[in-house]
Image (cartoon, rainbow, N blue to C red):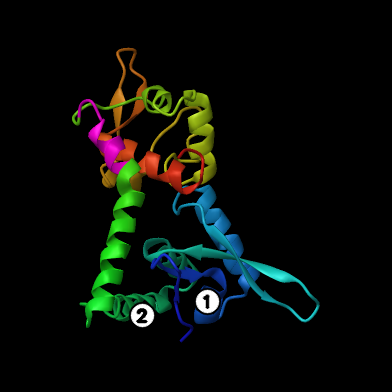
């Protein structure tokens, strides 16, 4: 079975080419399925990586996903392969259990790695600690203002990233169900009787992480 890649940041991922090889579906068909699922807000925006160069010098662009989205994609492509993919993920994750240092040098390296992770996490920790009210639901305008942008700009970015707003509702913004189920947002009725999507504090942190990962804020 085609291996799932282990990136340098230790995040386990699977590429669209590996999904094609696993399911026996043409790579271009796999990429079309991925695009459709993303457009419908079912999966998040894929990371794009370069594949191997073909004999004619063309470098294929591969879509890269984590566990949840790769399972959704493979289930759509070929449901009978879903169990095999689940088994593969479980096997890979079991091999990623933390290892204790075997000597003093490894202990020093582990301490250095942990210090680096804390340094990278500092902006997020600071952001979370500065949330004024952990129980307050927030509009897109309120979330956007904390990043010095308008709600229009923030929502445009979120539309491009996908996985937050439903693309099936054209006249208003509605969260996709998985976003709500994750505790990131709620739909409330305004005094005028309109539906309004509101972000929870967890959703605000989720949006912040998305903006950080895309290099939009730092």
Name the one closer to the observer, 151 or 167: 151
Image point (52%, 57%), residue name:
46
Residue nearest the viewer, comparing 47 with 96: 96
Local SS, label 1: helix
Q: Nearer the viewer, residue 178 or 46?
A: 46
Query: Would residue 5 be found to the left or right of residue 115 on screen?
Result: right
Query: Main SS of the magenta segment?
Result: helix
Residue 81 coordinates in the image, percent (x, y): 42, 78
Asked whether disc 2 touches disc 1, contact meaning CB atoms under 8 Å apart, the reply is no
The residue that appears at 52% across and 25% down in the rendered structure is: 152
Residue 126 painted magenta: yes
Confirm whether residue 97 shows in the render.
Answer: no
Q: Tell me: 74 left or right of 187.
A: right
Q: Which residue is at 49% across, 23% downward?
A: 150
Residue span colored magenta: 124-133
Secondary structure type for disc 2 = helix
Instruction: Give the residue pinned by disc 1.
Output: 18
Q: Give the residue at mark 2.
A: 88
């Amino acid at each position: 079975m085609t291996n799932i890649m282990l990136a340098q940041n230790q995040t386990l991922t699977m590429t669209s080419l590996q999904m094609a090889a696993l399911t026996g579906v043409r790579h271009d068909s796999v990429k079309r399925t991925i695009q459709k699922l993303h457009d419908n807000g079912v999966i998040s925006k894929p990371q794009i990586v370069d594949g191997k160069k073909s004999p004619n010098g063309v470098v294929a662009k591969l879509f890269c996903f984590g566990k949840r989205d790769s399972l959704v994609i493979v289930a759509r492509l070929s449901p009978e392969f879903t169990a095999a993919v689940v088994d593969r993920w479980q096997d890979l994750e079991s091999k990623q259990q933390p290892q204790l240092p075997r000597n003093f040098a490894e202990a020093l390296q582990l301490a250095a790695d942990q210090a680096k992770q804390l340094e990278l996490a500092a902006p997020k920790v600071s952001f979370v600690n500065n949330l004024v009210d952990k129980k307050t639901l927030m509009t897109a305008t309120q979330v956007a203002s904390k990043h010095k942008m308008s709600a229009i700009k923030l929502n445009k970015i979120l539309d491009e990233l996908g996985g937050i707003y439903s693309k099936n509702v054209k006249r208003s913004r509605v969260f996709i169900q998985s976003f709500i189920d994750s505790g990131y947002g709620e739909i409330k009725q305004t005094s005028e009787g309109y539906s309004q999507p509101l972000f929870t504090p967890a959703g605000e942190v989720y949006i912040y992480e998305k903006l950080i990962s895309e290099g939009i804020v730092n």
